Image (cartoon, rainbow, N blue to C red):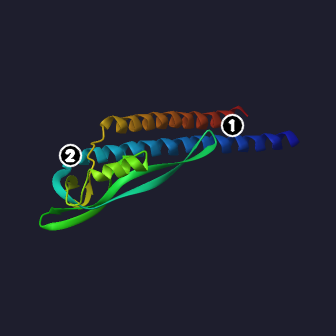
Amino acid sequence: MQEEKQGIVSRIGDFFWSALFVVGGVVFALFITYIGIKEFNQYQHWDEYQQLQGEVSELYVYSKNHNSVAYGVAKTSTSWHLGGKYHYLFESKEYEKQDSFESFSTESEAKEALKDHHVGEAIRVWFHPDRPDEAILDYQKPTIGNSLWFIGFGAAALLLFMGLLVGWIKDMFMKEERE
């Protein structure tokens, strides 16, 4: 009787950990695939962005602290930015945005770059005509390769974990038939 009870407890434990592993794997695979599809959709919309000329209305230097952990050691680093406000006109309506223009390693580099720019300076602004209040200064079209890697890896992981799920369910029924 005691052996039978231990066997049931062991089987429940095996069931729990196996189910957790497979379900976690499927959720992970779906998440990775979702990231790839989301990136792919963003890639398709980049062709719709248009360029126009804007004007710098304010300039300043600011810092950002970045926290990271590597090999169990917490590290804080600082990056310096030349930022400011700019405005642009689209279909007779003026829009104003605030953004980082450039990034630097040191404060002195950022302050030196500040000398090269001035309020009233013309800048290139990229915007989406359906959402003209969303604008960016640095137009770098993403490559489709990243999206395909995520989609491919996510699909492969999904197939792997679905195969494990089928094998696991089959094994559970085979054990019951043997007993």
Q: Is residue 62 left or right of residue 50?
A: right
Q: Which mark is residue 147?
A: none
Residue 99 appears in view: no
Q: Nearer the viewer, residue 128 or 31?
A: 128
Q: Secondary structure at mark 2?
A: helix
| Mark nearer the viewer, 1 or 2 | 2
Front residue of 48 and 165? 48
Q: Where 153 falls versus 75 (above or below)?
A: above
Residue at point 26% right, 51% down? 137
Q: Residue furthest bottom?
A: 93
Image-based side of 137 in relation to 108, left or right:
left
Residue at 41% x, 38% y is 150
Residue 119 percent across, percent down from the top left: 23, 60
Amino acid found under the numbered disc labelled 1? Glu
- Which amino acid type corresponds to the residue marked 2 in the rendered image? Asp
Q: Nearer the viewer, residue 178 or 93?
A: 93
Secondary element type, mark 1: helix
Tag 1 and tag 2, C-beta contact below 8 Å = no
In the shown orientation, is residue 67 left or right of residue 86? right
Q: Mark 2, residues whose alpha carbon is within 10 Å: few (<14), some, or many (≥20)?
A: few
Question: CA–CA distance between discs 1 and 2?
Answer: 58 Å
User: Where does label 1 land, which residue?
Assistant: 176
What's the residue at 62%, 38% (across, down)?
71
Report the number of numbered marks: 2
- Height in image: 170 above or below 131? above
Please say whether residue 156 is visible from this viewpoint.
Answer: yes
Instruction: Provide residue 1's location: percent of width, then percent of height.
Output: 87, 42
Q: Quadrant of the C terminus?
A: top right
| Residue 149: percent from left, percent from top | 39, 34
Q: Label 2: which residue?
A: 47
Disc 1 crowd, CA 10 A, few/some/many (<14, 14-19, 20+): few
Pick whichever of labels 1 and 2 is earlier in the sequence: 2
